[in-house]
Image: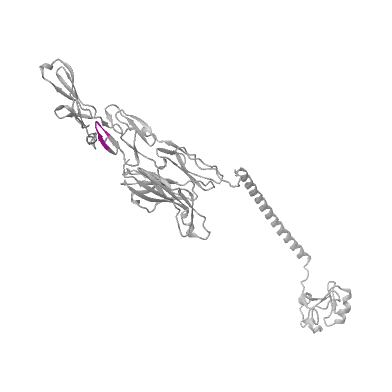
Amino acid sequence: PKFSSPRVHCVPATDRAALESSRRGFKHFLVYQTPTFQDRSEENERDLPQSRRAAAACVCLPDSRHPWAGEPFPLCVFLQECPGTQELQNSLRQAHKLLSTHEASYLQSLRTLRKKLSLLQNSAARLPTKANGNVTCPKLEAPLNGRKLGKVLLPGHEVHFLCDLGYELVGSETRQCKESLTWSGQQPVCRDINECASSPCANGGTCTDEVNGFMCECAKGWAGSTCQSPTPTFFVTMTNMSAATAGAAAATSFPLATPSPLVRPSKCSQVQGTTHCTCEAGYTILGRDTSICMDIDECELFHNGQAGRLCLHACVNTPGGYRCTCPAGYNVTRDGRSCKDIDECAMRQNNCTRDQLCVNTYGGFQCVKVECPRMRNATYVKTSPTRCERNPCPVDNKACSQAPNSVSYHHMSVISNLSAPRVMFRVSAVRVLGDTLRFALLGGRGRRHFTVQRSDRQTGQLMLVSPIQGPATLEVEVEMSELERRVQIGRYITKITLFVSQYEF
């Protein structure tokens, strides 16, 4: 060999015989590389750098059954020298430090994961689970004399409550299913409105509260829906100067044969020379003829007079009296003078189909079909008969996220020339995610009659600012926007339709 070392045994690459003879004692042979791989002169060896000499070597095959890995000599590769002891210890210390750091991070992540799993397990144990696996809030019942709108009981959904005419809602108008599977707010009740609380019956009349109204029982001598009109009384006294009748006391009747029910004979009596003639209720002496009583036209006599009207709607004169009538869609009340609206929806006196909502109005009803809005960038699903909610938006669809989160529909019945200003409707946020709520009035027929103002931080109210002459149908939209640092994060639209009656009752 040309030179040797304890680690590497090297022979000249050109000495094939020496290489073959030396193979017996070695399993692998390492031969350093020369520049040309063919010329192995000492001059060439001296020309090689020392680092190249130590690093350049060729790996020979281990036994004679395999040929050399190259022609005419083996291929050569560069081998890196083994590091020193100090360098090796430094590398081991760095590896140990790196492994310790990863181990600490792993243990911390594991503890955090265990804590989260424990919280989830505890939460799941407290949640009621249905047999089919669905988790919902408990079912809510509609209040007595009221209605419930909304059937979805999943977290985030709302249920709304309304009362029938003549009742007021006490409690939460809207309740939302929370993540804890409990309802927000309190269960509402519909309480009868006591119309007698304001003492509407005048002149000693007695008030009886009724559903959506009241009735006055008037004292003697008074009449009217609120006992505001005096009852007409007619009495005629005539003096007879005849001496023959002086001091006599007798009763005389003057019969009159007439087919007209509007004319009747009077009833007279003589007392000490004085003749007293009277007529039945609803009749009066006709001129100077004390024997004839003529019917009193109460409708004409009390038509828009200072004493008030006899009938709320129309008066029909009858022999000796009168009769009040009401327009279609109303019934005459028990006092015979006022009119009460017929609830065709509650009494099922309507022709609305199953996909329509029956809305009672003053003097009639309306069949309304609520349809969700159709927009290019968003789709909606009906979650209750009067509410539509937007389906989830794609992450990159900004136009969809700007569309209203929900659209609610409400229908109201009002009388003609309703006094103003007055609050007509309130819009309130059940929960506030952002830092600001804004209320605005959008377009619609009859927008000039309304305005929107805030009543508190979470509530806006629709105000009627001028009376509306009926019959008319008006629409108005109230928008509630939720913002976080002046950036809109939610929009909620309430569409209100008002059916204005042609009557003022």
**Is residue 57 on the magenta stretch?**
no
Question: Compared with residue 154, is residue 98 higher up or lower down, i.e. above or below?
Answer: below
Name the spot of residue 415 as percent of width and height, x first: 34, 43
Q: 257 or 1: which is nearer to us?
A: 257
- The outermost residue toward the top is 247
Q: Which residues are magenta?
A: 315-322
Left-right relation of 98 to 364? right
Residue 454 in view in this figure: no
Image-quadrant location for residue 340: top left
- Left or right, 199 with reference to 20: left
Judged left or right of residue 25, residue 37 is: left
Q: Nearer the viewer, residue 22 or 205?
A: 205
Quadrant in the picture for residue 261:
top left
Residue at horizontal 32 percent and vertical 36 percent from the top = 338
- Which quarter of the rendered picture does the C terminus lie within? top left
* Quarter that holds the N terminus: bottom right
Q: Residue at x 66, y 53 (%)?
A: 109
Query: Could one spot residue 223 in this view of the protein?
Result: yes
| Residue 390 x/y as whole percent | 49, 54
Judge whether 137 appears above or below 371 on screen. Answer: above
Residue 152 coordinates in the image, percent (x, y):
52, 47
